[in-house]
Image (cartoon, rainbow, N blue to C red):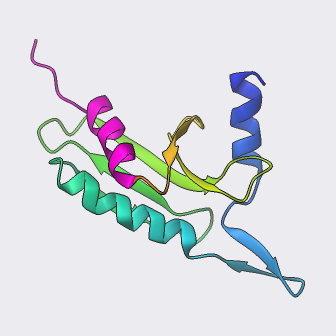
Amino acid sequence: MQFSQHVELHKSKPWDEIAEGGAKVVSDQPVDYLQELVGELGSRGLQARVVQARTGPAFLRVVNPEAASLAENVTCAPAPDSTDHYYWWSWGELLHRVDDPGGAATKVAHVLEAHPY
């Protein structure tokens, strides 16, 4: 599967909704996984908060306080054709599995690391 096809699959599925007796309800599971990641990112010196809009899935806004222009949004959703949840980069690429928030935090911290000129 090409990267662009993967991004479209990730964006096209309503990840935070599940069918229950014919009705759609919002699952708190992705938010719980994002909250676990908040603590891990905080221990690495990054600021993070879960953002929940009226529509669309919740996401995690992560900022490097030493360089506010270094920021990233992380989502949490199942992989296509799977029920297993993963963390995802804002551009739709798989970041890390949710059962290891420390590993995901290490990757995000590396990407948002400030480099002196």
Magenta region, residue range: 101-117
Please, is residue 42 above or below residue 5 in the view? below
Which residue is located at x 31 percent, y 60 percent?
A: 38
Split into 4 quadrants, where in the image is the N terminus? top right
The reply to whether residue 52 is in sight is no
Q: Nearer the viewer, residue 31 or 105?
A: 105
Please, is residue 109 above or below residue 14 in the view? above
Q: Is residue 16 left or right of residue 68?
A: right
Which residue is located at x 74 percent, y 60 percent?
A: 14
Report if residue 40 lies within the magenta region. no
Report if residue 112 lies within the magenta region. yes
Spot occupied by residue 83 in the image (x, y as percentages of width and height): 72, 59
Please, is residue 56 above or below residue 89 in the view? below
Which residue is located at x 59 percent, y 62 percent?
A: 57
Split into 4 quadrants, where in the image is the C terminus? top left
Spot occupied by residue 11 in the image (x, y as percentages of width and height): 70, 45
Q: Main secondary structure of the magenta part?
A: helix
